[in-house]
Image: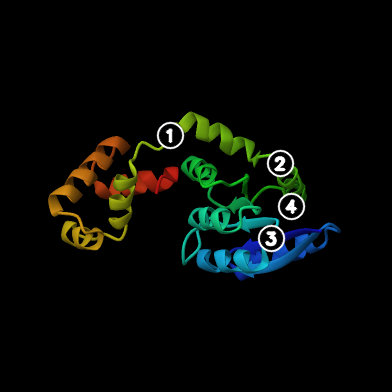
Amino acid sequence: MIRVILAEDQSMIRGALASLLSLEPDIEVVGEAATGDEAVAVATATRPDVALLDIEMPGGDGITAAEEIRREVPGCHVMILTTFARPGYLRRAMEAGASAFLVKDSPARELAAAIRRVLAGERVIDPGLAAAALSAGPNPLSPREREVLSAAVDGSTINDISARLHLSEGTVRNYLSSAIQKTGARNRIEAVQKAQAQGWL
């Protein structure tokens, strides 16, 4: 049996996925989680063959959870299943060690087939998203620029961001200015929007 855990914050979708996979004779859902942190704990406790993770969850996103699961349970294959077909997400997921990246509007029968393919050592990526990621190019933002821009998402002031990240106000301004320039934005609000749309944050 292929042992699978599901991490999805919307309980109706999580339940539907569990029901769908339980119809497969060779797949067993051995754990469920609603947050990224829970996903890591469930994976560590159950040692599954495959962890199926949503990207946008509270308590640590799916990409962060993917990195931790790969570290804690090296034999577990991570698959990302998301609503958000953003090129930057795909690149970040692959860097985090994900074996598959599928969008939720894929036909249901493809999910079980993808799980089997991943277990056989294949990488499974939504073809439309792969093409978009190649044309979009790499994330132009450095890790620090991403961190500062992420801290600006909620409209925090330079002073707030400086205190939260333990950086000087001048350093925060420099990183924001650089991020604005790299995203081709007019201000930091637009830079945040552009970076989020590409999946760079």
Q: Earlier in the sequence, mark 3 or mark 1?
A: 3
* Element carrying mark 3: loop
Image x and y of residue 183, in percent = 32, 38
Q: Is residue 180 visible?
A: yes
In the image: residue 21, left or right of residue 181: right
Q: Which mark is residue 48?
A: 3
* Element carrying mark 2: loop
- Could you tell me the amino acid type at mark 3? Pro
Please tell me how crowded label 1 is: few (under 14), some (14-19), or many (20+) other residues with Cα within 10 Å: few
Residue at the disc numbered 4: 108
**Comparing labels 4 and 1, the label whose residue is closer to the camera:** 1
Q: Residue at x 46, y 42 (%)?
A: 88
Image x and y of residue 165, in percent = 25, 58
Instruction: Establish if 127 lies above or below 145.
Output: above
- Could you tell me the amino acid type at mark 2? Gly
In the image: residue 194, left or right of residue 13: left
Mark 1–mark 2 distance (CA, rounded to whole Å): 25 Å
Residue at the disc numbered 1: 138
